[in-house]
Image (tube, rainbow, N blue to C red):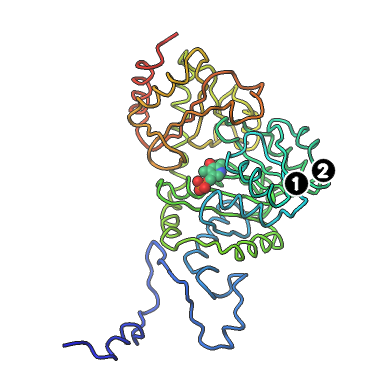
C-alpha cells in the first residue's frame, strides 16, 4: 500500500515538537541553510549581526554562535567570527581591512601562506607588503609609513620559532595608529592572552592596558585537537572593527559546517589539558635533542638560548615555572649532514608521521628548507637543516626511542 499524500507531507510538516528542557553535556548540532520566520514582518525585523536572532544558516546557528562565544572567552576577546580554515582567517582579516593603496607588514618568519597571499591576491588588488625583522621592533617601526594599515604579528614565528618582543611590537603599532593582528595559533588563548598582554585586565574578558586589535587562530590545531577538522576564528575587542570583518565575511559567503563546529565544541573542554600534555612532551624531547651532538641549535621558546626566550618569559611566564609553550619545536641539524641524510632520518621515524599541521594526537615531523623561506639566513640561526617536530599525545619514552633509532640509522654520531 502506497502512502497517502498526507503521510508524505506529514514527514515534512509534522505536528510533534519535542519537549523543552533537554540537558546533556554537549550542545545539539543545529544544521540549517533556511531558518523560518513566523511572519513576513518578523523576517523584515530580525537582525542577525548582533546574534540577537537567526536569519540564515550562513549568518549563524545556535551551534556556531556557541562556539564563537566560547572561543571569545578563551582568548579574552569580545567578538568572534568563524571561517573555514586558519588561512581563511588570515585572508579575511586582510580583505576586510586593507584597501587598494594600503600596505601590510609581515614578519620575515610569518606563516608561509600568509606571505603568499600578500604576494598574490593582495598585490593584484594594489595592496603592497613589506617583511620586517621579527626580532627588531625598531625595524618594524622604521617600516611603518602613512600607507601602512595592518601589521601581522606571530609569536613565535612559524618553523624557526623565534619569540618576538610582542609587547614592544604592539606598542609600536599603537603609537603609530596602525592595526595589529596576531596569528594566535601557537598560543591558542592558553600560553598568553592576546587582549591582555601585560596581565593587568580589570576582569576576565576585559581588555588589558596592552592588547592586539585582532587575534586570528587556526582552530585546525589545538581547538580541534583531532587532526580532522579545518576551521579558523577571528577575534576582536572593538565592535566597529568586528563589524568591518563580519560584513566582509558575510559578503564573501564564508561559513562553517555545523558538524565541524560541533567537533570543535566537543574538543574545547579538554584543550587546556591537551595543551599542557603536548607542551610537556615537547620539552622532554627538546631536552633530549639538546644533549645530542647532531643538534646544532634547539629552537624552542621556553629554552634558554632559543631566540626570543626572554620575550617568551615576559609574556608567557610571569610567575617562574608556570609558563606554557605548546607542543612545537625545531631542531637545526648540524650542517655536516646532507639534506638527503636528514630526509632519510625523517623517513625512518615510525611514530612521528610526515605531515603538515599540528595539534592532534599523532606526533609529526617536517624538514624545512629555511634558506628558501627567508630573505637571508637570519644571524641568530646556526647553519644546518631545520626539522620541525610537533608532539602528539604518545608516551615520551616511546617517542625518544623512535627518535633514537632513526638518529642511529641515518645521522651517525659526530
Ligand atoms: C596551520 C596554521 C595556519 C593555517 O591554518 P589552516 O587551518 O591549516 O588553514 C595559520 N597560521 C599558523 C601559525 C598555522 O600554524
Query: Disc 2 on helix, strand or loop?
Result: loop
Q: Is residue 336 shown above or below 159?
A: above
Residue 186 is drawn in which quadrant? top right
Q: Residue furthest right?
A: 146
Residue nearest the observer in this picture, 277 or 98: 98
Of all residues, the one furthest to the top in this rendering is: 414
The residue that appears at 61% across and 76% down in the rendered structure is 47
The part of the image, by quadrant, that contains residue 400 is top left
Q: On the picture, is 168 further left or further right than 344?
A: right
Tell me, for residue 145, which label it has, or none.
Answer: 2
Q: Mark 1 touching mark 2, by CB under 8 A?
A: yes
Q: Horizontal placement of 47 versus 273: left or right?
A: right
In 3D space, how far apart are the residues under numbered discs 1 and 2 (Cα atoms)?
Answer: 8 Å
* Residue 323 position in % (x across, y down): 56, 35
Task: Name the residue nearer the viewer: 99 or 330.
Answer: 99
Q: Quick one: label 1, few (<14), some, or many (20+) residues within 10 Å?
A: many
Task: Answer yes or no: disc 1 within 8 Å of ligand 1.
Answer: no
Is residue 39 shown left or right of residue 264? right
Residue 299 horizontal/vertical position (percent): 55, 26
Indicate whether 80 appears above or below 337.
below
Most distant residue in the left direction: 1
Does the rendering let one see residue 364?
Answer: yes
Residue 59, by quadrant, is bottom right
Residue 103's tag is: 1
Residue 397 drawn at (x, y percent) = 35, 26
Q: Residue at x 81, y 44 (%)?
A: 175
Q: Secondary structure at mark 1?
A: strand
Q: Quadrant of the C terminus?
A: top left
Instruction: Look at the image and tell me whether residue 190 can be seen.
Output: no
Amino acid at each position: 500500500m502506497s502512502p497517502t499524500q498526507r503521510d508524505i507531507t506529514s514527514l515534512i510538516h509534522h505536528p510533534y515538537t519535542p519537549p523543552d528542557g533537554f540537558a546533556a553535556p554537549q550542545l545539539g548540532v543545529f544544521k540549517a541553510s533556511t531558518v523560518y520566520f513566523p511572519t513576513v514582518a518578523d523576517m523584515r525585523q530580525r537582525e542577525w549581526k548582533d546574534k540577537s536572532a537567526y536569519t540564515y544558516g550562513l549568518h549563524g546557528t545556535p551551534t556556531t554562535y556557541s562556539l564563537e562565544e566560547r572561543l571569545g572567552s578563551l582568548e579574552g576577546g569580545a567578538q568572534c567570527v568563524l571561517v573555514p580554515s586558519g588561512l581563511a582567517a588570515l585572508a579575511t582579516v586582510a580583505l576586510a581591512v586593507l584597501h587598494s593603496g594600503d600596505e601590510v607588514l609581515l614578519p620575515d618568519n610569518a606563516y608561509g601562506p600568509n606571505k603568499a597571499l600578500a604576494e598574490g591576491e593582495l598585490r593584484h588588488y594594489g595592496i603592497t607588503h613589506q617583511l620586517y625583522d621579527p626580532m627588531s621592533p625598531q625595524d618594524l617601526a622604521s617600516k611603518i609609513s602613512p600607507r601602512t594599515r595592518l601589521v601581522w604579528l606571530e609569536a613565535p614565528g612559524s618553523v624557526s620559532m623565534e619569540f618576538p618582543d610582542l609587547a614592544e611590537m604592539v606598542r609600536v603599532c599603537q603609537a603609530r595608529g596602525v592595526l595589529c593582528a596576531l596569528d594566535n595559533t601557537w598560543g591558542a588563548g592558553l600560553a598568553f592572552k592576546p587582549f591582555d598582554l601585560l596581565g593587568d585586565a580589570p576582569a576576565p574578558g576585559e581588555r588589558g592596558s596592552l592588547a592586539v586589535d585582532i587575534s586570528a587562530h587556526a582552530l585546525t590545531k589545538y581547538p580541534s585537537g583531532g587532526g580532522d577538522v579545518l576551521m579558523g576564528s577571528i577575534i576582536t575587542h572593538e565592535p566597529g572593527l568586528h563589524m568591518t570583518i563580519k560584513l566582509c565575511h558575510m559578503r564573501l559567503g564564508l561559513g562553517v559546517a555545523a558538524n565541524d563546529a560541533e567537533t570543535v565544541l566537543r574538543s574545547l573542554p579538554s584543550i587546556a589539558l591537551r595543551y599542557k600534555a603536548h607542551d610537556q612532551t615537547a620539552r622532554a624531547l627538546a631536552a633530549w635533542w639538546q644533549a645530542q651532538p647532531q643538534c646544532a641549535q634547539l629552537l624552542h621558546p621556553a629554552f634558554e638560548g632559543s631566540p626570543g626566550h626572554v620575550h617568551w618569559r615576559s609574556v608567557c611566564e610571569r610567575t617562574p615555572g608556570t609558563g606554557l609553550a605548546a607542543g612545537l619545536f625545531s631542531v637545526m641539524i648540524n650542517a655536516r649532514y646532507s639534506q638527503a641524510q636528514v630526509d632519510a632520518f625523517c623517513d625512518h621515524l615510525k611514530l612521528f608521521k610526515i605531515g603538515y599541521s599540528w595539534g592532534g594526537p599523532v606526533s609529526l615531523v617536517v624538514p624545512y628548507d629555511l634558506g628558501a623561506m627567508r630573505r637571508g639566513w637570519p644571524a641568530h640561526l646556526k647553519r644546518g637543516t631545520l626539522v620541525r617536530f610537533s608532539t602528539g599525545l604518545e608516551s615520551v619514552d616511546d617517542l625518544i626511542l623512535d627518535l633514537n633509532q632513526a638518529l642511529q640509522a641515518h645521522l651517525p654520531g659526530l
